Image (spheres, coloured by chain):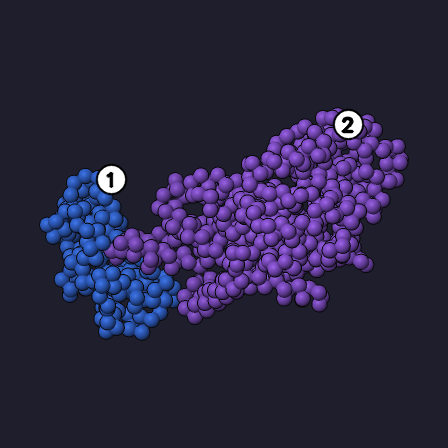
Chain colours: A purple, B blue
Amino acid sequence: MNEIWSILLGLGDKFAAHIVLSASAIGLGMLVALPLAVWASRSPTIARFALGFASLVQTIPALALLALFFPILLSLRVVFGEDLPTLGFLPALLALALYALLPILRNAVTAQANLDPGVLEAADGVGMTKWQKLALVEAPLSAPFVMAGIRTASVWTIGAATLATTIGQPSLGDPIFAGLQTQNWALVLAGCIASAGLALVVDALLGLVERGFANRNRWQYGAGIAVVALGVMGALAYQSGGDDDDTIIIASKQFSEQYILAQLIGSRLEAAGYSVEYRDGLGSAVVHSAVASSSIDISVDYTGTIWTNELERTDNPGREVMYDTIVEWERANTGVRVLGRLGFENAYAFAMREDRAAELGVTSLEQLVRFSPDLTVGGDPEFFERPEWIAVRDAYGMRFGETRNFSPTFMYNALRSGEADVISAYTSDGRIAADRLVVLEDPRGALPSYDAMLMMSPRIADDEGIARALQPLIGAISVDAMREANFAVDREGEGKLSPADAAADLAQKIGL
Amino acid sequence: MVNTLVTPSGGRVLFGGEDVTLLKQSQLRRRVGYVFQGIGLFPHFTVGENIAIGPRLAGEKLSANRIAELLALVELEPNIASRMPDALSGGQRQRVGVARALAGDPELLIMDEPFGALDPITRDALGNKVRELHEKLGLTTIMVTHDMAEALLLADRVLVMSHGDLVADHTPHELLAREGGEIAQGLVAVPRQQAERLAMMEKSGAQMSDQP
């Protein structure tokens, strides 16, 4: 409990960012939805179209909607120039505002449709102009219902804003995602408590405003609006406190190794006098584009990932050729500087429980093929879409009975509990040794190599100070050292470390 | 149609010699008091605010005295001005509706089945009240009703419409003297027969009570 408290107290900046993001999204949603609702109440065609569109948006999972804005904004750079942000606040704002549209719009349209026709006739009868009718009659009579819609939208938005973490916008999702990956439940709980608490408080305040409108009590709605406005201004003031253009932004994807390496890189840079900021839990797919567009400055990526996703190659020319080709390709095409390889590989590999492998008498993928129709394979959410899986499937003719997606952490639990027979493990994962898993050999070389590389965005590519500070990490991290650090974070119970502590241990181990 | 809530599909409506479709809509409506069955008091305004809305739209503020005066015209207490419409009875609401229609000193009062939803006693009393105000304030009043008795008792001139056509235009006396054609007489026959039957019942009742 004390731990959760201390985490909660340290969440100030995430909390402020969360409030500013949610408030902006709801504000933008209202700005679009309310005039649209007025228009819709005058034209059934517009009403059908607007409500249809808002409902359609609602069917897109929030996580996907957030991710979709990255390519949309990227393509809009043609119009708005290269300075248009593609990650962080802008896409999060747009996606959440779209999400907030439906409840506001639907309630406003319904409220308008249900106004007493006698009252509307009277408004015309006494000689109101269209605007007077809207301002004096329609708006005040619809206000409580519209407010109920805004209330619903606010609770949704505050909840969904936690997902903004995945596109590089700091929010209360940061501790949730970091905690889920590192199995630090206090962190997850703290993030959930903070965002749920915020949603409850906002709901209560907006409920006060709604009742104020319904009872035509100026004090009630005035007080509600005032407190909400003060909260948003406070968050804005808090946020604008520590902004700095020279800050180096370090990205991490959604697994422990990335959190540890980000901390390791961050501590090196801080020791060299740079100020750093972390963007934890980015979706794997957006990290490369984020570095290439200088939305973030430093990431650790893997040769196999870049090879298939960015160079769109499916061949496997061998480890060295692959690396050299990537360095040259990045320099020529994106301006990203590959500082070097950290020394270990984090490749995809198929792993099984020792007893299960022995039972089937399997040590390689080749031998696994004939059992595969009776087996369940588990992979991380992107694995079965990745060319690596397709390469393995085609090279060996693998046909698993069932495929299931797990977050990386739960994948190992699934193997342990027997919910999966084989998983797509990562070779630097500490749990391979800890769970005594058998890594199946790949005699046909279908799986490419995954050397960890340090990537620098075009913005800082020429900064030799940064390069010098990070140079000692190049070639310094063995796969054993990485496994040990990863396991220290992933394990449960005794000896579990935070990514920062594991990074400090790792630094010591490699002699820094 | 006179206050352009409905647009004529043909012909013209002249108001003070001017074609209503050429007048500015909101200004035209402020010169016409409008009372209708739905009453349409604004539920979020007090009775006083409801009465004062027409002048307010024209940019003038109605004094509390004037509101009390208008309430007195329709026989309501001045303290009712601060109440909300939902605290009033149906009859009181319609009286407020009439007061609101009179607040802008209209040149014309249009009443579209104004008493349709009221009980017969309230209806009769309000009808008489409106006729009284009509005389007292020197108004021009157009009232639409389905009740021929109401029309005959309140109006100076009765126009009968059937399927969108004007089929009769007479004074109540002329109608009672069997003028105006078949349709109009069909309508006049209803209250007349009712009255005759009531008179018969009264007579026979009196005879019965005469029996020892």
Q: Quadrant of the C terminus of chain B?
A: bottom left
Residue type at mark 1 is His
Q: Is residue A366 above or below residue B27?
A: above
In the image shown, does A45 or A339 lie closer to the viewer? A339
What is the distance, in whole Å, between disc 1 and disc 2 at their CAs? 90 Å
Marking on residue A485: none
Residue pointed to by mark 1? B163
- Vertically, is A79 above or below A181? above
Residue type at mark 2 is: Arg
The image quadrant that residue B66 belongs to is: bottom left
* Label 1 crowd bin: few (<14), some (14–19), many (20+), radius 10 Å: few
* Left or right relative to A270: residue A459: left
The answer to whether residue A201 is above or below residue A392 is below
Q: Residue furthest left?
A: B17
Q: Is residue A420 visible?
A: yes
Local secondary structure at mark 2: loop
- Which residue is found at the position 47% from the left and 62% from the top? A210
In the image shown, does A488 or B98 lie closer to the viewer? Answer: A488
Residue A387: image location, x then y, percent = 67, 32
Q: Position of residue A469 (x, y in %)?
A: 65, 53
Q: Position of residue A446 (x, y in %)?
A: 73, 30
The chain letter under disc 1 is B
| Direction from residue B49 to residue A384 in the image, left or right | right
Q: Residue at x 26, y 65 (%)?
A: B52
Q: Which residue is mark 2?
A: A444
